[in-house]
Image (spheres, helix red, strand yellow):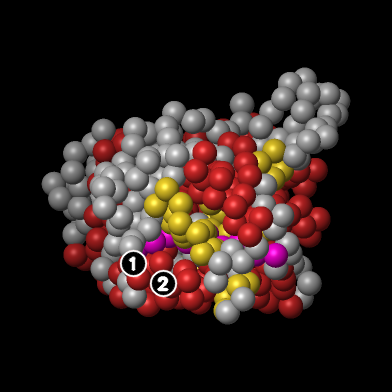
Amino acid sequence: MPMPHHQILVVDDEPDLRTLYELTLLRDGFRVTTAASLSSALHALGQQAFDLIITDMRLPDGLGLNLIRHIKAHHRGERSIVITAYGSAENAVESLKAGAFDYLTKPVELTQFRTVVASALQSPPTSVQAPGTASDHRRKPSSRRGNVGLITAAMDAQQALQCLVGESPGMTMIRERIGKVARSMAPILITGESGTGKELAAKAIHANSHRFDQAFVAVNCGAIPEGLLEAEFFGVRKGAYTGATQDRIGFFQAAHGGTLFLDEIGDLPLATQSRLLRAIQERQVRPLGSTHEESVDVRILSATHKDLAAEVQSGKFRQDLYYRLNVIDLHMPPLRERREDLPALCEALLRRITQESGLGSLSLPPEMLAVLCAEPLPGNVRELENLLHRGVALRDHHGLQLDLPTAGLSRVDAPLTAETVSTTPAAPASGTLPRDLQGHLDRQERDILIQALHETGFNRTAAAARLGLSLRQIRYRIARLSIDVPANTDTPDDVG
């Protein structure tokens, strides 16, 4: 509900539109000041503080963009919404980069107008506040439910940042940048190699945003069959096709009011990219089988391990969608560029793994940590986690086993705290026989399965197809060999 003390400045040189916005806001209980030019808007800012500024992009004596830059340059706390001409994607992106909270395109629909205003006012401005502005924006966590990767309880903002473990310059910069960009509506493109923690960064952005208590829906774009993409993204109406026996919401509707995280966005086919771009620009989606569009209010975060600029040049990714998604970029450094973070990462990962396994506290001795530091770890943090998870999963009455798959790497026998570590024998040299045939075969099978899972983004259906197995067979092998498969990576075909 709007609070009577919320002060909003509306800037537009067209009297009819200015009056329409003013009356709409007054009916909703806001206090409104209007201005018809950039100079009069700057004068109003000199007289008082506002909670929100709504400005047209083109004004008689300048651009609304200049108003946003003025607010940022003077470290003011007002949030801003920019109204741009229809199809002016460049203006919208430029305003978001300049610091605008969100944008609207003409002709403005009043329902969408109210939604964006309410979203901007869900939490107080970041610095200067109008007198009497509420100081505590934390609300009761929402019980909204979606269908993929949904966080149903608010994650503490600081806790989410601490999940990005490490004090290297690269990780320190990542946490600082997240703190700066989380509270706007600007789309963020998170780049980095597989296993660097792109989804953790997305969750930290969501947890530090004003949408922290709403839905976080994570979607692996590369794991959805192309024929199902439109239905999965936009929903389905009963009877739309054979088998559609009931209405089903899509990812956009599930994330309404919250954040939609599009992982591996570079894997989307061009036809879906076009429909996705329209949904992002218009903030409306049309479910399959429906004749009406539905308004959606989502913050878009996306991630990829690909070079999207190169994909644009080769014609595999739409340039307009790339610019729309890449308003703010966030690059996750690979593990080889932050080796100093390995001790803290190992400690944090082992703590979580042992807690989940119901074991006591374990830590790596220096000599074993040195061996891990010598590992290339091309799979980054995910590979490191799998190595440690494997060591805990293979624990028997002899102790823990750290099985390092790199050929030719020397093994280290050392205790993990009070436990004895027995390392697994390396692959036999040419002309010799393994002393443990089953163990040797299991290790080879395990490494092949892990490689196939990595290459398919842990999509078990795709990995099984590559290896000539059925889904049931690969599930059995994953369970038998104690392979850790990350959550929220299954396609609908994987579930069941």
Element class at badge 1: helix
Q: Is residue 456 magenta-colored?
A: no
- Kind of residue at disc 1: Gln
Tell me the distance, in whole angstroms, between the alpha carbons under discs 2 and 1. Answer: 7 Å
Q: Residue 159: image x %, image y %?
A: 28, 49
At 61% from the left edge and 26% from the top edge, which residue is drawn? 496
Q: Which image quarter holds the N terminus? A: top left
Q: Which residues are magenta?
A: 77-85
Q: Quadrant of residue 177?
A: bottom left
Can residue 93 be seen here? The reply is no
Determine crowd level at label 1: few under 14, some 14-19, many 20+ residues with C-alpha closer than 10 A: few
Q: What residue did someone put label 2 on?
A: 43
Q: What residue did someone put label 1 on?
A: 47
Q: Which mark is residue 31?
A: none
Can you name the residue that lies furthest to the right here? 242
At 60% from the left edge and 52% from the top edge, which residue is drawn? 19
Up/down of 214 relative to 9, above or below: above
Up/down of 74 relative to 106, above or below: below
- Kind of residue at disc 2: His
Can residue 19 be seen here? The reply is yes
Q: Is residue 84 magenta-colored?
A: yes
Element class at badge 2: helix
Q: Nearer the viewer, residue 221 or 121?
A: 121
Can you name the residue that lies furthest to the left here? 418
Q: Nearer the viewer, residue 147 or 29?
A: 29
Q: Nearer the viewer, residue 402 or 462?
A: 462
Left or right side of 479 for 286: right
At 20% from the left edge and 52% from the top edge, which residue is drawn? 363
Give the total of numbered labels.
2
